[in-house]
Image: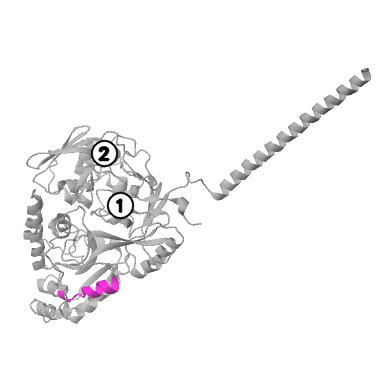
């Protein structure tokens, strides 16, 4: 018995030990399998890249140039796009040309239209972390008017800086020197800067106790002073500006808006097309030659957006330089230009303008008709000019923008047309920044220069002021140097008219007066063409969701990027 028992116990013990060993072995196998699976998952994740939630929503857009970094200095396309994304404004435009609250949550206006009181929303933070206050608005307005560049001209004739003040941290009172009918809509160009941050970077300059008003610091592009949905990450001079999403932004954004935006400052057609093919660019500039749009349209996933705009392509005629200082020469030029060929053979998506004001703007006269080409009438006009019989001694210098290659074809067509009536033309290719510099002085501005100009606010007064008022002479928006006292008075009278319908009628009369002076050739009413990556970019403007104000189609917070849809 004893031996049996001992033997039995020994067998049971051995069985239990075997079971334990088997269990341990099984657990070990399971653990090895789990570790292997996790390792494989990690390996696969590292090979496949970040998860959808972690993937960067990158948006890259090309422009004719990099932005000016100071919102009191720039006003061109790239600069305006930069400003509206990096800086906030009191109001935001609607599709019908009205405005809605933005940083200002409400406002009141006095009965005479001269005093505007704005209440600011709470919790708006600058990128520096400071809360935006009423004093920042007053400082920004004063700074823009004092520097006198960029969009300062919109406010300088009307704002009484002595009486404009911050009543308290959340209340701004802006007092006007005279009534200004479109005042509210112009505030979409008052970009609010962090006054304390700017003051910390003031250097020696010409603005009294404010020195250079922080202009050199902002223009250097090392940091911004805004509170907008995006903040400056990096500027590569002459090449690109990189923005990143501001996590502390107070306002709404689309759920898949970009986390990073790169604004490139070049338009070279082969480069742009190659970048689109390689998906290294999401939205192109609007300055590509037509054949490049055709080529990009054949790239799988790329579509061409056709976006109406409040923009006209003008040939500006210098009214104070021979021979275009003679109105009969200018009228002859307008009659001799071949508008039909310019659209048919160069830019077939464009439409004929009826005058200086884009048709989509309130204040464009609907009864107007486009100028028709008439060579015989053009020759008759030339015979009335003081240069008749000696026109060969006064060649016309025509500048076209080097960054916009198809403009050369317009310039050459102009040359061909003018030679038909006996005018000599020298065509010159000039880089954009050199054009801007050259047009600051009357003597260095050419006889003719071809430039797009878009309305800065949704009304005819915007384009008439920037194009033909003496206050804008010396800027790239007015190569005519018109400086006509009667036109100035008519524009000022229209803008001071509070009643909307009366103001529209006055705009019509200005357009008729400009017909007499013939300061410009109205070539195209612009339809903006942009190639974009339709597979993974939701671009609202391509769906017809646009605002009648320059550059607002590129408010980056409403463009959506879906990196998971990028084709492998």
Q: Is residue 130 above or below residue 243?
A: above
Q: Callout 1: helix, strand or loop? A: helix
Q: Callout 2: helix, strand or loop? A: helix
Residue 39's quadrant in the figure? top right
Q: Residue at x 25, y 59 (%)?
A: 309
Q: Is residue 239 above or below residue 138?
A: below
Can I make out residue 236 in this image? Answer: no
**Residue found at the far top of this picture:** 2
Q: Which residues are magenta?
A: 335-346
Q: Which residue is mark 1?
A: 81
Indicate yes or no whether the magenta region holds residue 307.
no
Q: Is residue 278 above or below residue 91?
A: below
Q: Residue at x 23, y 76 (%)?
A: 415
With 125 as the anchor, is 394 left or right in this view?
left
Residue 525's quadrant in the figure? bottom left
Q: Position of residue 412 (x, y in %)?
A: 27, 75
Q: Position of residue 203 (x, y in %)?
A: 28, 43
Q: Foreground residue, 448 or 201?
A: 448
Quadrant location, the N terminus = top right
Q: Residue at x 43, y 50 (%)?
A: 562
Q: Foreground residue, 552 or 536?
A: 536
Q: How far separated are the C-alphas under marks 2 and 1?
A: 22 Å
Q: Main secondary structure of the magenta part?
A: helix
Q: Which residue is mark 2?
A: 195
Q: Position of residue 339 (x, y in %)?
A: 21, 73
Precedes in sequence: disc 2 or disc 1: 1
Q: Residue at x 26, y 48 (%)?
A: 71
Q: Is residue 159 above or below residue 463?
A: above
């Amino acid at each position: 018995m004893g031996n049996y028992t001992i033997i039995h116990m020994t067998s049971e013990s051995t069985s239990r030990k075997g079971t334990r060993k088997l269990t341990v072995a099984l657990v070990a196998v399971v653990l090895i399998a789990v570790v292997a699976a996790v390792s494989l998952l990690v390996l696969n994740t590292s090979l496949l890249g970040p998860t959808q939630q972690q993937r960067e929503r990158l948006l890259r857009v090309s422009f004719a140039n990099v932005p000016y970094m100071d919102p009191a200095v720039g006003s061109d396309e790239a600069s305006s796009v930069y400003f509206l994304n990096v800086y906030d404004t009191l109001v935001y435009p609607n599709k019908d040309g009205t405005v809605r609250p933005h940083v200002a949550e409400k406002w009141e206006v006095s009965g005479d239209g001269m005093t505007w009181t704005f209440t600011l929303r709470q919790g708006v933070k600058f990128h520096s972390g400071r809360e935006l206050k009423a004093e920042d608005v007053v400082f920004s307005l004063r700074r823009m008017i004092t520097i006198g560049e960029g969009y300062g001209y919109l406010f300088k004739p009307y704002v009484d800086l002595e009486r404009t003040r911050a009543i308290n941290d959340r209340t701004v009172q802006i007092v006007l020197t005279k009534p200004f009918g479109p005042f509210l809509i112009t505030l979409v160009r008052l970009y609010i800067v962090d006054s304390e941050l700017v003051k910390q970077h003031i250097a020696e300059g010409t603005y009294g106790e404010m020195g250079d008003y922080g202009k050199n610091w902002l223009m250097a592009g090392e940091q911004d002073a805004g509170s907008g949905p995006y903040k400056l990450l990096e500027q590569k001079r002459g090449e690109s500006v990189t923005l990143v999403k501001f996590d502390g932004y107070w306002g709404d954004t689309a759920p898949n808006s970009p986390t990073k935006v790169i604004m490139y400052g070049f338009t070279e057609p082969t480069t742009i097309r190659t970048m689109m093919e390689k998906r290294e660019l999401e939205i192109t500039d609007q300055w590509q030659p037509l054949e490049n749009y055709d080529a990009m349209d054949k790239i799988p996933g790329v579509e061409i957006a056709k976006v109406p705009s409040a923009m006209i392509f003008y040939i500006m005629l210098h009214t104070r330089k021979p021979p275009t200082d003679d109105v009969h020469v200018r009228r002859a030029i307008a009659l001799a230009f071949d508008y039909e060929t310019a659209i048919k053979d160069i830019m077939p998506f464009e439409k004929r303008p009826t005058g200086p004001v884009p048709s989509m703007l309130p204040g464009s006269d609907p009864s107007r008709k486009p100028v028709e080409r008439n060579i015989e009438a053009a020759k008759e006009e030339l015979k009335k000019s003081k240069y008749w019989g000696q026109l060969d001694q006064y060649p016309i210098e025509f500048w076209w923008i080097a960054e916009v290659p198809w403009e050369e074809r317009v310039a050459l067509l102009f040359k061909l047309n003018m030679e038909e009536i006996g005018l000599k033309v020298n065509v010159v290719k000039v880089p954009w920044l050199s054009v801007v510099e050259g047009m600051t002085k009357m003597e260095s501005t050419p006889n003719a220069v071809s430039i797009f100009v878009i309305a800065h606010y949704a009304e005819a007064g915007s384009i008439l002021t920037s194009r033909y008022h003496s206050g804008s002479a010396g800027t790239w928006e007015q190569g005519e140097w018109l400086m006509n006292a009667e036109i100035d008075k008519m524009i000022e009278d229209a803008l001071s008219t509070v009643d909307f319908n009366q103001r529209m009628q006055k705009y019509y009369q200005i357009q008729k007066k400009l017909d007499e002076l013939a300061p410009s050739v109205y070539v195209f009413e612009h339809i903006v063409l942009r190639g974009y990556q339709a597979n993974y970019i939701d671009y609202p403007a391509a769906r017809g969701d646009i605002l009648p104000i320059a550059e607002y189609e590129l408010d980056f917070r409403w463009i959506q990027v879906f990196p998971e849809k990028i084709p492998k």
